[in-house]
């Protein structure tokens, strides 16, 4: 399922226009993105949680040249699946 399909499903299920559904979905994603970019955590019960993991910098190697390269520290979003979602997927 992609974002457009999610918008269409929401519009059909709630009997609202696609425009209104798009605004709801965009607002939800915007708030989730803002929370994660501020270092927060987003939890959706029975679905999972989103958080930010921090990775230290390290010295790596360029595979083509073999030259050492310094990789800077970084932060990446991380998703941890909820128990109910895990069970539902496993059953199907």
Image (tube, grey):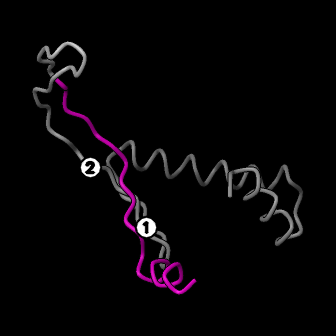
Label 2: element kind: strand
Q: Is residue 92 left or right of residue 21?
A: left
Is residue 33 shown in magenta? no
Instruction: Please identify the quadrant where the C terminus is shown.
Output: bottom right
- In the picture, residue 70 is in which quadrant? top left
* Residue 53 numbered tag: 2
Label 1: element kind: strand
Q: Where is residue 30 in the image (x, y as percent from the top left)?
A: 56, 46
First-in-chain label (2 vs 1) = 1
Q: Which of marks 2 and 1 is in front?
A: 2
* Camera-side residue of 78 and 11: 78
Q: What stretch is highlighted in magenta?
A: 71-92
Q: Position of residue 29 (x, y in %)?
A: 58, 50
* Camera-side residue of 6 and 43: 6
Q: Where is residue 33 in the image (x, y as percent from the top left)?
A: 48, 46
Q: Which residue is drawn at 48% across and 79% down?
A: 46
Mark 2 vs mark 1, CA separation in Å? 15 Å
Is residue 72 shown in magenta? yes
Q: Which residue is drawn at 89% across and 69% down?
A: 15
* Residue 43 numbered tag: 1
Q: Position of residue 25 (x, y in %)?
A: 68, 54
Figure label count: 2
- In the picture, residue 69 is in which quadrant? top left
Q: Is residue 49 left or right of residue 58?
A: right
Circle 2 residues within 10 Å: few <14, some 14–19, many ≥20:
few
Q: Residue at x 86, y 53 (%)?
A: 18
Q: Is residue 52 left or right of residue 73?
A: right
């Amino acid at each position: 399922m992609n974002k457009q399909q999610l918008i269409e499903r929401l519009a059909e299920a709630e009997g609202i226009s696609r425009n209104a559904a798009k605004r709801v979905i965009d607002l939800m994603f915007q708030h989730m993105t803002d929370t994660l970019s501020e270092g927060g955590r987003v939890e959706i019960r029975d679905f999972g949680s989103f958080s930010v993991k921090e990775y230290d910098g390290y010295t790596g190697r360029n595979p083509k040249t073999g030259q050492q390269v310094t990789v800077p520290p970084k932060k990446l979003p991380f998703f941890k699946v909820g128990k109910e979602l895990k069970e539902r997927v496993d059953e199907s």
